Image (cartoon, rainbow, N blue to C red):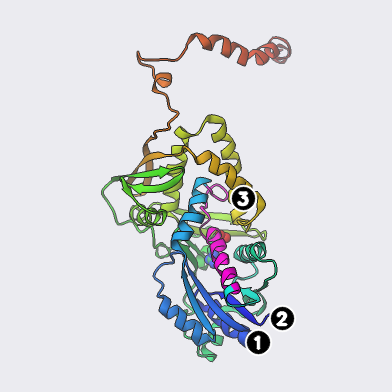
Amino acid sequence: MAKRVVLAYSGGLDTSVAVRWMVDNLGVEVIALAVDVGQAAEDYEVVKARARAAGAIDAIVVDAKEEYAAEYCAPALAANALYENRYPLVSALSRPVIVKHLVAAAATHGADAVAHGCTGKGNDQVRFEVSTRALNPDLEVIAPVRSWGMTRADSIQYAYDHNIPIAATKEKVYSIDDNIWGRAIECGEMEDPWNTPPAGVWLLTRPTATEPVEVVVGFEAGVPVSIDGESLSVLAVVQRLNALVGSYGWGRLDMVENRRVGIKSRETYECPASLALILAHRDLEGICLERDVQREKARIEPRYAELIYDGLWFSPLKEAFDAFIAETQRYVTGEVRLALAPGSCEVTGRRSPHSLYDYGLATYEADDSFRHEDSAGFVRLWGLSVETWAGTQGRLHQQ
Ligand code: ARG
């Protein structure tokens, strides 16, 4: 049995109740660890005080924003990672960095277990547990929310009875998870997939800007490094684009997705920066990647996104894909111009010192350098097999 546990602490109702519940029911010491991946408007002094009030022997906050941007968001961007072709993996991507810090804190503080506040129906439990076991198979993983059998009302009562100061009320109907890569909003009336998401659920994509604007995003070896020529960290690029692109009301998703546990789930997301960056990055690859590399990469991208979604960030296949993707990104350096207008974000230009776009080959003007004489024989041989078929079996078809 575990004696000391590091809990992934959000400061919300469930993880606050989980602190006290584990102390009382499992007889463990609890260390609360909050990992800052850019959640909106958290006051971490309040979060720490709440963890202590709930019974934690220690409360720690780690600022992982730069690390998350550079080591998790940037590789996902290099892979143009979109789960089921749409979702840029907001929550899925943050879990491995949170687990990395949980496992490190367990070692530093002599804990023999880690804990999370996920339910048994979602993807996040999978990500927390598989990632923990990948990093340290000796740690026990405790999932109090999965086993305590309390409803939301029970949890609120439990917090009240144990003097745990929580902000949650019965009116809080949405389950929200956010970080710099975007924001996920589920539950409430959206559990009926036919219902239009209420206007009030959107936070990052409230349309306030009216004047169209252009913005140039610079990349170096696949990593976003500048906006309008100003050098920035990956984190700063993402933060600026969230504010800018979001102000045009662009970057929303409304979808029903397949969870790892077999449930179809209606989710809404707002991901202005991540979706704009993937749009720009993929476009730049269009001029920087040789045809076959580009096509083969496009085949593995959906698989890479599934690995992230399914909790396999720390896995040998993901590592192998990383090596392939890193090789493809060597020359993905250049700039992409995005045009923003209310409700839209479009690529209107791209350039690169390593561009494979050859004007002489592409042009229809006088300075054409393409060897036209090569085409006739090439095309003839390209179609030879079909031509042969047409003259024999194909002819039989027509009769
Ligand atoms: N469905 C998304 C995912 O699995 C978002 C989950 C959001 N988590 C939450 N606790 N609201 O990645």
Residue 330, position as x, y percentages in the image: 49, 39
Note whether residue 191 is visible: no
**Mark linked to residue 1:** 2
Disc 1 element: loop
Q: Which residue is mark 3?
A: 319
- Return the disc, 2 or 3, that comes first in the chain's sequence: 2
Separation of marks 1 and 3 at Cα, in angstroms: 39 Å
Q: Amino acid at mark 3?
A: Glu
Q: Which residue is mark 1?
A: 27
Task: Indicate whether residue 48 is drawn in magenta.
Answer: no
Residue 300, position as x, y percentages in the image: 60, 42
Q: Are marks 2 and 3 in contact (CB under 8 Å)?
A: no
Separation of marks 2 and 1 at Cα, in angstroms: 10 Å
Magenta region, residue range: 81-107
Q: Is residue 289 above or below residue 186?
A: above
Q: Residue drawn 67% across and 59% down?
A: 262
Residue 350, position as x, y percentages in the image: 38, 36
Question: Which residue is more in the foreground, 251 or 95?
Answer: 95
Q: Is residue 30 above or below residue 387?
A: below
Q: Where does the C terminus fall, quadrant-wise?
A: top right
**Label 3, ligand 1: CB separation under 8 Å:** no
Quarter where residue 309 is shown? bottom right
